[in-house]
Image (cartoon, rainbow, N blue to C red):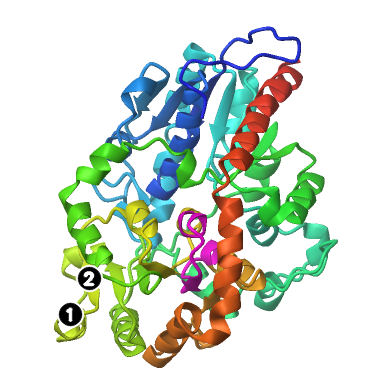
């Protein structure tokens, strides 16, 4: 990356004024982190960012690197008090999915404060998330160009905002689940009916009957620029379709892989947790350990946790399982599991230094829920994936990775999404050690070269910043 404070020249060699970008991600750490990565990349290039969120969410964020502090202003806007939203809840990690409808109301309640902030700070751009369809009219009234920055791949938009003329009023579960037949290219990607039904039921508040509903069509089509954390190598045809569908410039910012992220490597190396983990990994054979991690917000049911644990045990593979949710004491591993597997595995119940672990030579593959950030981190190191998705965007990413033959999904019941310990064990062994899975492992290594290419992703960042300059002029005029 360029050193801090260096601002690019235009084609005539003239120094251009730094940009000022305001950002308002959705109230979820899984959205705030990727927005913050873009903020840091812009700051490294000498541009200024006003980063807006609730006080508690900003306090949860990683510290801004000292060298970037002059370029990034963190603005804490208190959320309004909303009936039925628990006291102190400011993020999706604070409430069950059924309460997201009230979190959405709190987010919308920021409108007046955000309007005043934009009036006084006068940024060149405002980046908004999927849940802020109310923000583009505010920005346009102030003559500020707005960009929708979406942290998930383009294929999600096809499923979550299908063109009305193609649906022909047929919004049956089967039709919604796909595969979409109107695309100018072939795809096998589809959702399963139980996934859609589970997602629909999971957003209804039992107490009030309310659901969280988001006007995605308005959010996607109201922007001056559509930005996505993705790359043409991953989904070029989907990006082309998106540009045609929404009639706005669509610009991938690249995958923002770990190699581009500012980290204090020296501090990480000295972390006592990492020292302990590294000692154990050093004692394992190369490419034999399966890393198991499902992100910080996914809460497994007791049944799924039990089957998963038995499956890991049955596989006979060495494993490192990052299982922070056990801290809450609501879930229990099968009796004796840790004792029986202590010679070949670790269950790590506090925060784990995931990137350090993934970079270690002992890791031979990963088990993942297929959240976008998680997939990018794991494929960055060329690791084959065993997938167990829970949310709709995770299911779609899982199907794409299967289509690209770099992953295999744990088989589940088409009726209710349940799975068995035997299917977990069999899938893990297929991906990590069986000869039949060698093609997946080789393909994952090849894809890792694309995901980890600093040259490629630096070019995406340059093109992204060039687009901000180009379309700011068009929007303002």
- Whether residue 418 is visible here, answered yes or no, is no
- Whether residue 102 is visible here, answered yes or no, is yes
Q: Earlier in the sequence, mark 1 or mark 2?
A: 1
Between 227 and 245, the one nearer to me in the picture: 227
Looking at the image, which residue is at 79% across and 49% down? 240
Q: Which residue is mark 1?
A: 338
Quarter of the figure that contains the C terminus: top right
Query: Please, which residue is most extreme toward the top here?
Result: 14
Instruction: State whether residue 414 is above or below residue 377.
Output: below
In magenta segment, residue 391: yes
Q: Which residues are magenta?
A: 377-394
Left or right: where 339 falls relative to 4: left
Q: CA distance from mark 1 to mark 2?
A: 7 Å
Residues at badges 1 and 2 in contact (C-beta under 8 Å)?
yes
Looking at the image, which residue is at 24% across and 68% down? 283
Q: Which mark is residue 303?
A: none
Disc 2 is placed on an element classified as strand
Left or right: where 142 falls relative to 63: right
């Amino acid at each position: 990356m360029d050193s801090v404070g260096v601002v690019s020249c235009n084609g005539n060699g003239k120094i251009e004024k730094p940009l000022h970008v305001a950002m308002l991600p959705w109230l979820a750490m899984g959205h705030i982190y990727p927005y913050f990565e873009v903020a840091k990349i812009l700051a490294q290039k000498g541009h200024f960012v006003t980063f807006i969120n609730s006080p508690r969410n900003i306090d949860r964020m990683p510290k801004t690197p000292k060298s970037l502090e002059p370029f990034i202003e963190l603005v804490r806007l208190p959320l309004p008090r909303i009936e039925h939203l628990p006291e102190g809840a400011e993020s999706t990690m604070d409430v069950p999915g059924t309460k997201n409808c009230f979190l959405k109301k709190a987010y919308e309640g920021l409108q007046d404060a955000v309007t005043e902030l934009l009036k006084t700070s006068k940024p060149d751009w405002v980046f908004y998330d999927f849940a802020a369809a109310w923000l583009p009219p505010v920005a346009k009234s102030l003559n500020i160009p707005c960009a929708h920055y979406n942290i998930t791949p383009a294929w999600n938009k096809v499923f979550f905002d299908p063109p009305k003329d193609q649906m022909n009023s047929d919004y049956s579960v089967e039709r919604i689940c796909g595969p979409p037949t109107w695309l100018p290219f072939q795809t096998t990607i589809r959702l399963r009916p139980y996934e859609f039904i589970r997602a629909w039921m999971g957003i209804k508040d039992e107490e009030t009957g309310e659901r969280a509903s988001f006007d995605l069509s308005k959010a996607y089509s109201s922007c001056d620029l559509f930005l996505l954390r993705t790359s043409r190598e991953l989904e070029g045809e989907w990006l082309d379709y998106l540009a045609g569908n929404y009639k706005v410039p669509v610009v991938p910012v690249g995958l923002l892989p770990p190699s581009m992220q500012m980290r204090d490597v020296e501090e990480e190396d000295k972390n006592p947790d990492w020292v302990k983990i590294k000692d154990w990994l050093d004692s394992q054979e190369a490419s034999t350990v399966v890393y198991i991690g499902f992100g910080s917000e996914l809460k497994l049911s007791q049944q799924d946790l039990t089957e998963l644990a038995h499956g890991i045990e049955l596989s006979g593979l060495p494993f490192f399982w990052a299982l922070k949710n056990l801290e809450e004491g609501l879930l229990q591993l099968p009796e004796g599991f840790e004792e029986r597997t202590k010679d070949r595995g670790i269950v790590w119940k506090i925060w784990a230094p995931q990137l350090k672990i993934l970079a270690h030579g002992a890791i031979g593959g990963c088990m993942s829920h297929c959240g976008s950030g998680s997939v990018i981190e794991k494929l960055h190191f060329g690791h084959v994936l065993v997938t167990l998705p829970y949310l709709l965007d995770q299911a779609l990413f899982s199907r794409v990775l299967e289509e690209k033959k770099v992953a295999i999904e744990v088989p589940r019941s088409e009726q209710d999404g349940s799975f068995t310990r035997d299917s977990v064990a069999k899938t893990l062994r297929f991906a990590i050690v069986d000869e039949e899975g060698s093609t997946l492992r080789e393909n994952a290594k090849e894809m890792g070269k694309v995901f980890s290419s600093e040259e490629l992703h630096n070019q995406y960042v340059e093109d992204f910043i060039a687009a901000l300059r180009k379309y700011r002029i068009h929007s303002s005029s």
